[in-house]
Amino acid sequence: QKEVEQNSGPLSVPEGAIASLNCTYSDRGSQSFFWYRQYSGKSPELIMFIYSNGDKEDGRFTAQLNKASQYVSLLIRDSQPSDSATYLCAVNRPNAGKSTFGDGTTLTVKP
Amino acid sequence: EPEVTQTPSHQVTQMGQEVILRCVPISNHLYFYWYRQILGQKVEFLVSFYNNEISEKSEIFDDQFSVERPDGSNFTLKIRSTKLEDSAMYFCASSAVSANEKLFFGSGTQLSVL
């Protein structure tokens, strides 16, 4: 079982729609959860982070965490073509000096 | 806005040669990392560094790899004898006060081993 697993893409949504990206993790003790966006040929940049169960909203982005189900998601509302990128889920276990990344889900937003 | 800087942006080397990739983390950050990404694959952890010593390393980070913080600003990754499979984008990252925080990534060094 992969430490961090993301729904296989690619994901394609029309402009203005909601994009839903999902991630599951294997270590129940994981405490910190991150979503990074990576444009082709570029480095990852942080979109959202979440530490507690529930929803966290920032503009058009909402991160959702359910530790009981070991599940974290990212919703992008009113998707724009500029949101087209690969979205990386990253998880930190306590006292681990690293983030573990999933394979990424590639999102395409079509005008 | 403070950023992590990496040099060079591209490095081409012959198999068996030594390479040093350089990074300047954000100045007040305490944790430093190297990750790599082979083309089309996931971002993989190599090593984390805190308080002038390695905090954690992956199976990838074998005896051919080493890291150093030679002064108060630079953080380097050395590959002693490069292999073809070392070809990848190498990202340096830093985090502020703990390893559980968000990472700030540099723009990467594309290493090509011929």
Image: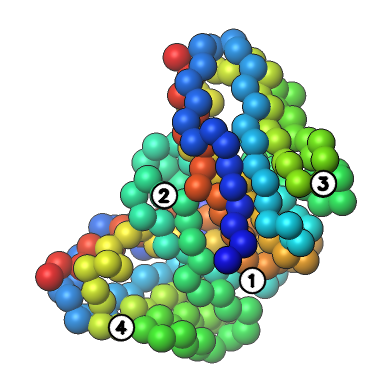
Number of the front mark, 3 or 4: 3
Circles 3, 4 touching at the beta carbon (< 8 Å): no
Q: Which mark is residue B72?
A: 3
CA gap between label 3 and label 4 equals 43 Å
At label 1, the amino acid type is Ser
Give the residue at mark 4.
Answer: A77
* Pointer 3 and pointer 4 on the same chain: no
CA gap between label 1 and label 4 equals 23 Å
CA gap between label 2 and label 4 equals 23 Å
Residue A40 visible here = yes
CA gap between label 2 and label 3 equals 27 Å
CA gap between label 1 and label 3 equals 29 Å
The percent coordinates of residue A89 (x first, y second) are 49, 63
Number of the front mark, 1 or 4: 4
* Pointer 2 and pointer 4 on the same chain: yes
Number of the front mark, 2 or 1: 2
Residue closest to the eye, B28 or A25: B28
Give the residue at mark 1.
Answer: A32
**Element under label 2?**
loop
Q: Chain of mark 4?
A: A
Number of the front mark, 1 or 3: 3
Q: Would you place residue B72 above or below residue A55 in this image?
A: above
Give the residue at mark 2.
Answer: A42
**Element under label 4?**
loop
Circles 1, 3 touching at the beta carbon (< 8 Å): no
Residue B56 visible here = no
Number of the front mark, 2 or 4: 2
Q: Residue at x 63, y 79 (%)?
A: A51
At label 2, the amino acid type is Lys
